[in-house]
Amino acid sequence: MNVRLFVFLCLFPVTLWAQGFSGLGADVKGFAAPAPDPVFSFPREHGPHPEYRIEWWYLTANLTGPDGTPYGLQWTLFRTALAPGEAVGWRSPQVWFAHAAVTTPDAHFASERFARGGIGQAGVEAAPFHAWIDEWAMKGADFDAMTLTASGPDFAYDMMLSAKGPLVFHGADGYSVKSQQGQASYYYSQPFFDIAGSLNLPEGKVAVTGSAWLDREWSSQPLGETQTGWDWFSMSFDDGAKLMGFQLRQSDGEGYSASTWIAPDGTTSNMPAGAFTAKPLESHQVAGREVPVEWQVKLPERGVDVTVSALNRDAWMGLSIPYWEGPVTFRGSHSGTGYLEMTGYE
């Protein structure tokens, strides 16, 4: 066993490891909790918040090759804490892990990395921006223009990111409620990245261009005790508008949903809880699980009624914490491309 992996397994928060994403519903004392009416300061917020239990820098991209073939790309750095705060060296309570993936119409490649905080192997610096774990990195002079690199056994990519619009804030000015009980996170996005670069795949190198969406989120208990997972959609319409919507599933069969409408100029509208609906239309067996791969998504307030379909139904992230994530297309009242993430399907 890799020594770093062994150390990580020994130190990783037991509840989160055992329960996967459902462990995010556990109440852990001592950490800060998001509060309404946040006052953000940039570029500071692009960096880590060690007083909170969990945090991520999460980028997905819809790409096209020279022959029109669609691809998807993911790069995510997660921080989770054994205790609030930071310390030097191995005394640091911060644990880092990362996921990277490439999806094609016929294949899905994924890899992961693990690191302990305090020793320089992984971390995030706000300005100039630099998020890294080993040689995987997202960095630039600022948050608007960055490079992006990652690699796995069967893939690698090297990308340039350029923001063409403003940051957007979800919920009430970045305070994003996740349940009727009031669990919440701080949540903002940069959904206006242009992206270009190259994918290295088993069949060779492919030049690609497209659009990317970066999520920033941190909290200490973002799920309620009865919530078992979520279905998250990022949708970029052909007319320039965008939609972020998620629903959180509960063990009693009920759920909670929230969404943000994003106009082409970046103006946002926080939609009422429950306005966004996502109904599974068709499931697919992958990794021994039945996972929805076609959905009917509605947001009546904006005239949205679309069928969302996976580019590759087998886009299963078979990693230490498994989940499904991949690029999607949609048709109906609107057309375009996006990404779908589904967690908690056991």
Image (spheres, helix red, strand yellow):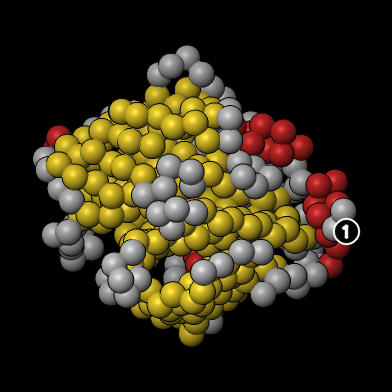
Against 263, is 149 above or below? below
**Toward the viewer: 268 or 7?**
7
Q: Residue at x 39, y 61 (%)?
A: 71
- Give the secondary structure at mark 1: helix
Residue 306 lies left or right of residue 32; in this view the side is: left
103, 175: nearer the viewer: 103
Residue 119 placement (x, y as % from top left) = 80, 70
Q: Is residue 118 above or below residue 233?
A: below
The furthest residue to the front: 203
| Residue 151 to residue 336: above or below | below
Where, quadrant-wise, is the C terminus in this rendering?
A: top right
Q: For the view shown, which residue lies furthest in the bottom direction?
A: 141
Q: Residue at (88%, 58%) from the top-left corner?
A: 3
Residue 246's place in the image compared with 73, above or below, is: above
Give left or right: position of 260 versus 83. Answer: left
186 with respect to 163 (left or right): right
Q: Is residue 13 visible?
A: yes
Q: Residue at x 18, y 66 (%)?
A: 265
Count of marks, rendered view = 1
Q: Quadrant of residue 154?
A: bottom right
Q: What percent of the width, then of the height, locates residue 101?
A: 54, 58
Q: Position of residue 10 (x, y in %)?
A: 85, 46
Res 7 seen here: no
Q: Estimate the x, y position of residue 180 in percent, counting from the top left.
A: 41, 26
Count residues near mark 1 (Cα–Cα under 10 Å), then give few for <14, some for 14-19, many for 20+: few
- Amino acid beneath label 1: Val
For the residue pair 62 and 44, the one nearer the viewer reads as 62
Q: Which residue is mark 1?
A: 3
301 relative to 86 in the view: left or right: left
Q: Quadrant of residue 22?
A: top right
- Residue at 53% of width from left, 44% of height from top? 316
